[in-house]
Image: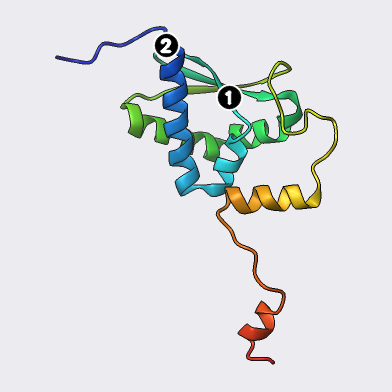
Amino acid sequence: MAPVAVADPLPSDLDSLWAAAHESVRAEHGLLGAVLNEATPAILTEQELTLAFPTTAAFHKRKAEDSANRAILIEALRRLTGRHYRLEFELREDLPSDTASGAPPSEEQIMERLMEELDAEELPEDWLQQQKGGD
């Protein structure tokens, strides 16, 4: 029996599809995955996925809209669903943001987030010297 197409998927379908697509992109393209951390799936139809970004994440929205990044996300969705989705991106005021408090993140918060999102680790201060064969 062929799968039945759903015009208005349940919110849980949207959330689970987005979680799987985001994880797939993050695994292969760490920087794009980090950009998409700000995205919230808003609308899913048979042919289109709309991702919303908080108004404070306009830069992330522009990066996601980039044709190469858009193609990566479309391909991840195709692998997961077998469908070719059109992507729409929008800014929304009603979405939470990491900068919702109004205060910019500290350098330590930025480094923690980058290390987490890029699966990086901090090197000891003398690492470069050790690599060069120094003391």
Tell me what residue is drawn at x 34 percent, y 34 percent: 79
Could you say which is closer to the camera, residue 126 or residue 56?
Answer: 126
Could you say which is closer to the camera, residue 78 or residue 94?
Answer: 94
What's the residue type where badge 2 is placed? Leu
Residue 54 shown left or right of residue 11 in the figure: right
Q: What element does badge 1 sit on? A: strand
The label number, if any, that marks residue 12 in the structure image: none
- Could you tell me if residue 64 is visible in this image? yes
Could you say which is closer to the camera, residue 18 or residue 76?
Answer: 18
Q: Residues within 10 Å of mark 2 (few under 14, many from 20)?
A: few
Q: Is residue 72 above or below residue 131?
A: above
Residue 27 shown left or right of residue 40 in the figure: left
What's the residue type where badge 1 is placed? Thr
Residue 94 percent across, percent down from the top left: 71, 16
Q: Residues within 10 Å of mark 1 (few under 14, many from 20)?
A: many
Tell me what residue is drawn at x 60 percent, y 34 percent: 64
- Could you tell me if residue 74 is visible in this image? no
Tell me what residue is drawn at x 74 percent, y 47 percent: 109
Q: Are marks 2 and 1 in contact (CB under 8 Å)?
A: no
Residue 72 percent across, percent down from the top left: 47, 39
Where the C terminus falls, by quadrant?
bottom right
Tell me what residue is drawn at x 58 percent, y 58 percent: 120
Quadrant of the rendered image containing residue 51 = top right
**Disc nearer the start of the sequence (2/1):** 2
Q: Which residue is mark 2?
A: 10
Q: Which residue is mark 1?
A: 40
